[in-house]
Amino acid sequence: MSVLLPDELWRRILEIGIRDSGFDYKDLCCISISCRRFHRLSVDDSLWSHLFSSDFPNQISNCNNIKDSSSSSSFKSLYRIRFEREKERRLLAHRRAVMRKESQVLEFSRKIRELEGQLRGETDKLRATAVELSNLHKVRQASVALNVWQPEIVRGRQKEIVEQCAVSVESRQHALEMELKLCKQRIGGFEKSYKAEKRRLKSAEEELASMKYHPLRDYGLTSRGDNECNTKRKKLKRWQ
């Protein structure tokens, strides 16, 4: 069929494919290695001009100025130069994104360690308060027993000890109960924050792993390649 069609028609087909059918530089390079005729047609300056204008619309004026100043440079060579610059820019942007995500993971880890320390401190405080409250209950029960069963001399001694105490047993018991309740509330808040930070850390670590693992990442020039990749992924998911 390629023998029957003239070069002008094939060139027109390629131009329509580039302009209307999402024909990109990869497709043009693949066609160029199929046969000698397509190799000769694929290096046509008009095709690479269409590709340059579609992939780098903001650089077409600068490209025309360079083209006018240097008649030896072709649109294919200009496209290659611009593509390498764009690829390098995207690589640097990707590295910066990875570094930002790594710093985010480190910040989440720092917050988790801080919350773990606060949880340990509040748990120790809760245990100490509970022990003191339990001892206070025992002392109160012992005081009641002494007042009931012991002789008058012992009761007088207990009265002197109670009078020497600056804070009454009831007020101290009430303070310990309030402190115990406050410790439980703080522990509940710390546990809630700890779980939230763990979820954020896990999500950030998964995102970082997906960002670092990209052996077949396509640094496409436009969103056209990304849409095609998303369509292929959806088809594969449907088949699976």
Image (cartoon, grey):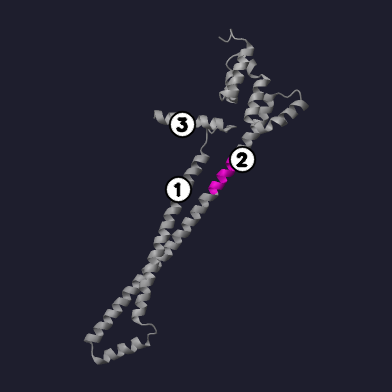
Report helix, strand or loop for mark 2.
helix
Residue 180 in picture, x, y percent from top left = 37, 69
Q: Is residue 96 visible?
A: yes
State the CA–CA distance, disc 1 to disc 2: 25 Å
Q: Nearer the viewer, residue 68 or 31?
A: 68
Marks 3/1 in contact by CB < 8 Å: the verdict is: no
**Outermost left residue:** 149
Q: Which residue is mark 2?
A: 92
* Residue type pointed to by label 1: Lys
Span colored in magenta = 93-102
What label does residue 18 carry, if any? none
Residue at 35 percent across and 72 percent down: it is 177
Q: Is residue 36 visible?
A: no
- Of labels 3 and 2, earlier in sequence is 2
Magenta span contains residue 85: no
Report helix, strand or loop for mark 3.
helix
Q: Which residue is mark 1?
A: 202
State the CA–CA distance, disc 3 to disc 1: 24 Å
Q: Which residue is mark 3?
A: 233
* Direction from residue 10 to residue 192 in the image, left or right: left
Residue 154 in picture, x, y percent from top left = 27, 89
Dominant secondary-structure state across the stretch colored magenta: helix
Report which quarter residue 121 is drawn in: bottom left
